[in-house]
Image: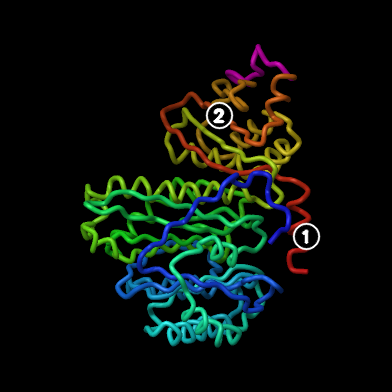
Amino acid sequence: MSSAVSPLAPKAVPDMPVIAGIRLATAEAGIRYKNRTDVLLAVMDKGTAVAGVFTKSKCPSAPVEWCRAKLKGGKARALVVNSGNANAFTGKTGRASTALTAKIAAKAVGCSEGEIFLASTGVIGEPLDATKFDGVLGRLAETAEPRDYLAAAKAIMTTDTFPKVATATVKLGKARVTINGMAKGAGMIAPDMATMLSFIFTDAPIAPAALQALLKSGVEDTFNAVTIDGDTSTSDTLLAFATGAAAGQGAPKISRASDPRLKAFVKAFNQVLANLAEQVARDGEGARKLVEITVEGAKTKASARKIAMSIANSPLVKTAIAGEDANWGRVVMAVGKAGEPADRDKLSISFNGIRVAKSGARDPDYDEAQVSEAMKAPEIAIKVSLGLGKGRDRVLTCDLTKEYVAINGDYRS
């Protein structure tokens, strides 16, 4: 966790409403960091539905494997998250740590181990001493309260420079339901059907299968459209919990994601995901520029996504932006290497609304001074028009600075 907050951090933090059926507490367990909270316990009421998406990495962490196995039950009573140690690439020791953590948490909350969900973030390859949770989780279960999501978000930070929270309230039937979310992530960010670590809570009465479908759909154009460095983590975990408490206020029980009564809820749910995903991009390690890349005129949306990601993950593009250089040649390079349909002579490129290249050559109205001034802005929009079809997509990234190297060069020390 950095002491210097990213200059791209949101200017205001939302007030996070209470959600019936959710209680939170944090503590210092001494996992790796000193004098800061590093463990979060979220306690859910009985009957809480759970859904999740996880990293597609072939080297997943032990907590990811645990959650995948327990997700089949569809119910959750507690979530335990620790920072400082990812419990990844830890073999049998890692699996034993997750089992012990779940056992301690289940005893503290008074539920089965199959209703405990786990997530860990931090250094890969270091054994996690789960005995440090003994006693700690018991105290947290007793003191947990239905508020202070900001403290919860702080407890799961690693190289993050600010806690990431988002909220939305929407009408479902006769009731107003709330959606609260938190996330962590600043480096090793290139999600693949998941996110870094993110947790969504709602009091809407949504069945596990419907919640799973909403989550899987919602992540595609939010967290999966964000990249910091092109590296997909071993630990990416996104879990959603629905307590169903709003049923008592007139919210209908939802069993299908296609239920038309969910229309407003789905929009709000995806807005929370999108808000958190953008905050992750704003907190990219060493970032000084938030970069939005839009590709239009592609053959398909999928093709546009691949080209946008090729641009977003290019170290040459990202360092040019860090240097405030509208180097469209690097964008051309990234388009060409993506392996998707493209026609050099139809390609147009703009930076912050200023077209710098048209029809495969420098724009005849190009003004170096004008573009250089535009590149000084903290938010940079790159637009690429391919002129081949109707496919369009948008991704978020950040620039690549010397600070990124400094952070990752001594991450373990």
Q: In the figure, 408 relative to 218: above or below?
A: below
Q: Is label 1 in a helix, a strand or a loop?
A: helix
**Residue 400's spot in the image, x, y percent?**
71, 45
Q: In the figure, 266 relative to 95: above or below?
A: above
Using the image, tell me which numbered label, if any, was put on residue 366: none
Residue depicted at 66% across the width and 36% down the height = 378
Tell whether 14 sits left or right of 373: left
Task: Decide which of 268, 62 is in the foreground and name it.
Answer: 268
Residue depicted at 45% across the width and 85% down the height = 108
Task: Decide which of 25, 224 is in the foreground and name it.
Answer: 25
Tell whether 388 sits left or right of 6: left
Label 2 – label 1 distance at C-alpha: 33 Å
Which corner quadrant holds the N terminus? Answer: bottom right
| Mark closer to the observer (2, 1) | 1
The stretch drawn in magenta includes residue 335: no
| Residue that mark 1 sits on | 409
**Residue 362's spot in the image, x, y percent?**
66, 18
Question: Tag 2: Cα neighbours inside 10 Å, few (<14), some, or many (≥20)?
Answer: many
Q: Is label 2 in a helix, a strand or a loop?
A: strand
Picture quarter containing residue 325?
top right
Picture quarter containing residue 196?
bottom right
Using the image, tell me which numbered label, if any, was put on residue 384: 2
Q: Which three-letter amino acid code belongs to the residue tagged 1? A: Gly
Furthest toward the top, the residue is 364
Q: In the figure, 152 relative to 99: above or below?
A: above
Specify which label sits upstream in the sequence, 2 or 1: 2
Q: Which three-letter amino acid code belongs to the residue tagged 2? A: Val
- The total number of labels drawn is 2
Picture quarter containing residue 333?
top right
The stretch drawn in magenta includes residue 359: yes
What residue range appears in magenta?
357-368
